[in-house]
Image (spheres, helix red, strand yellow):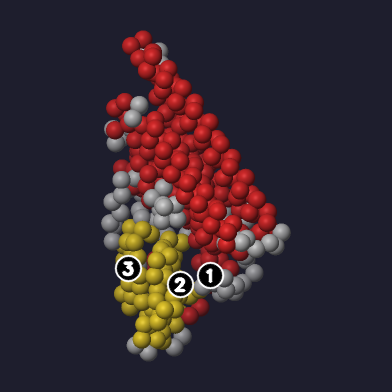
Amino acid sequence: MNILQIKDRGLEMEELGKLPEDILDLIYEHQLFKLFTAKELGGKDLDLLEGIKVFQQMSALDGNFGWLVTIGTGGNVFIPTLNKGVVGKMFSPRNAVIAGSGYPTGVAVKIDGGYRVTGQWRYCSGSDYATTFTMNCFVEDEGNRTDEIISCSVNRDQIEILNDWRAMGLKATASHTIRVQNVWVPQEETFQLGIIKNKYGSAVHSFPFGTFAEASFLSVCLGITENFLEEASILVKQRKHDPSRTERMGAIQFLLMQQQKNFRQLEERYYLLLNEYWQKHKEGHELTEEQLQQFSRISKDSAAACVDIANSLLRRLGMDAITETSSINRIWRNLYTAAQHSFLTP
């Protein structure tokens, strides 16, 4: 199967509610969950800009596909924070991928050698195929709940998946709630961002986490918007030869050209800033709080601009725009859902 054929599988994925097995195999074959994983662990070890652009390219094929590649690769940021033996076991398999949640909605009771973990976590994209789940918990020590947060990793066979993902878009991402009850997590299978425990890290892993996440999710929105504009262009071309619609289609064609230009400017501005920050980071310069806040503002504004671009055209695209099984409607719903992530909302 050619990776470009993903573009024709969107409706199938949405109706299935997950990625078909042959598409998962394609991801494993192309190491798309391991873009920032060291080559010794079977990964591609890409530069940040290279990986972020892959997120956009995959999202331009299909929003579900791009989102899952992005989320799956996002788990790579934990690699340097795990014990060497654990990281090899967790990331070396061909099908290795992490799903999980950063929200501390669980409790980890401290016991000699590790923790007993109980809780549930929402929106764990890729829950139907993840080999490991990560979750944040408040630590309870000697019966007292503390403000300390610990990140835990748990094998798939200890996880209950609630199958409750019911969003209007990204329906194939299986972003279900997970639950564990009194699961034993050894100390060596816990981790904390910023505490390095092995040699598998790269400059990508020390890049500020919040900025990495914002860049990742925005690249998905850019890719889906790119796909939306392509589909809108196809619909406009199909209709422009209808004599009864000549004047109306001319106006839509002009609006489409305007929004294509707006998108290109948006995309260029984003990558210029990201590249500037990435070069500073590689040169050993710490990004200031002001710079981090600037990137956050631009990410949120850019996500909103992507939604505005799609909305400005949607009302002019006829019944296809409101038909759930049409490509343009599915792409629009995926964009709205992706842009709703907490890293991108106001």
Horizontal and vertical percent position of residue 12: 35, 40
- Residue at x 48% of width, y 31% of height: 259
Q: Amino acid at mark 2?
A: Ser
Label 1: element kind: loop
Measure the C-alpha gap from mark 1 to mark 3: 21 Å
Give the mark nearer the N terminus: 1 vs 2: 2
Where is 294 relative to 331, above or below? below
Q: Amino acid at mark 3?
A: Gln
Where is 251 relative to 79, above or below? above
What residue is shown with label 2? 151
Q: Amino acid at mark 1?
A: Leu
Residue contact between numbered discs 1 and 2, judged by CB atoms under 8 Å: yes
Say if residue 94 shows up in the picture: no
Q: Nearer the viewer, residue 188 or 70?
A: 70
What residue is shown with label 1? 193
Horizontal and vertical percent position of residue 232: 42, 28
- The number of callouts visible is 3
Residue contact between numbered discs 1 and 3, judged by CB atoms under 8 Å: no
Label 3: element kind: strand
Q: Is residue 320 left or right of residue 192?
A: left
Give the mark nearer the N terminus: 1 vs 3: 3
Q: Quadrant of residue 125?
A: bottom left
Horizontal and vertical percent position of residue 19: 39, 48
